Amino acid sequence: MGHQRAYRVAVDGKHPVSKASPASERFAYPRRLTIAAVAFFLTSLAIPASYAQSSGPYAGMAGKWAGGGTVTLDDGSHERIRCRAIYDVAGVRMEMSLTCASDAYKFNLTASVVDQGGAIVGSWSETSRGITGSLQGRGGGGNFQVTAITAGFNANIALRTTGNKQSVSIKADSVFRAANVSLSK
């Protein structure tokens, strides 16, 4: 390389212009590495909490959801309902609140569950009617099949989460026959 520089000076009478001096080349790699580390750090801060929970049993569920669906009442009639849900996820534990209402009907379902290796156990309450009971079932990765049990009432609940979409299906043996809800974040 030094040989070529000497040749250019002799032929052109000018020194070649270096794109990077030896001193700047020494600092270019650490500077790029520092910029990459800062960019990675800032990107990791921007990841939503629900994404950070993607590997746990309640993958992608954390946060606020809203949507609507239908409820089938005890007499067989159907009504449209509007719903909102909040999921507070902490590792193997989740607190959940689902509120749905139509013009004539409303329910407030809350639950607290724990994942025990794919088995889901916990408690639930329907606050507008003062009913409480236990939950048991199976699931993980945002998909659950559980049964809500109390004296005189049983309901099967299927919950499926895919990305920012969620479906909740409740089939009961009294009070109301079923509810089907689609939610999104």
Image (cartoon, helix red, strand yellow):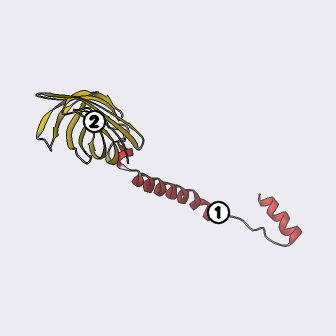
The residue to which callout 2 is attached is 77
Give the quadrant of residue 87: top left
- Circle 1 Cα neighbour tier, 10 Å, few/some/many (<14 / 14–19 / ≥20): few
**Tags 2 and 1 touching, CB below 8 Å:** no
Which amino acid does the dot numbered 1 rest on? Pro
- Circle 2 Cα neighbour tier, 10 Å, few/some/many (<14 / 14–19 / ≥20): few
Give the quadrant of residue 138: top left
The residue to which callout 1 is attached is 22
Point out the residue furthest to the bottom here. Answer: 13
Q: Is residue 165 left or right of residue 1?
A: left
Q: Nearer the viewer, mark 2 or mark 1?
A: 2
As helix, strand or loop, the secondary structure at mark 1 comes to: helix
Give the quadrant of residue 183: top left
Horizontal and vertical percent position of residue 172? 23, 29
Horizontal and vertical percent position of residue 185? 38, 48
Horizontal and vertical percent position of residue 128? 15, 44
CA gap, disc 2 and disc 1: 81 Å
Which amino acid does the dot numbered 2 rest on? Ser
Question: Which callout, 2 or 1, points at the residue further toward the start of the chain?
Answer: 1
Horizontal and vertical percent position of residue 112? 20, 39
Q: Is residue 51 left or right of residue 71?
A: right
Q: Residue at x 33, y 47 (%)?
A: 65
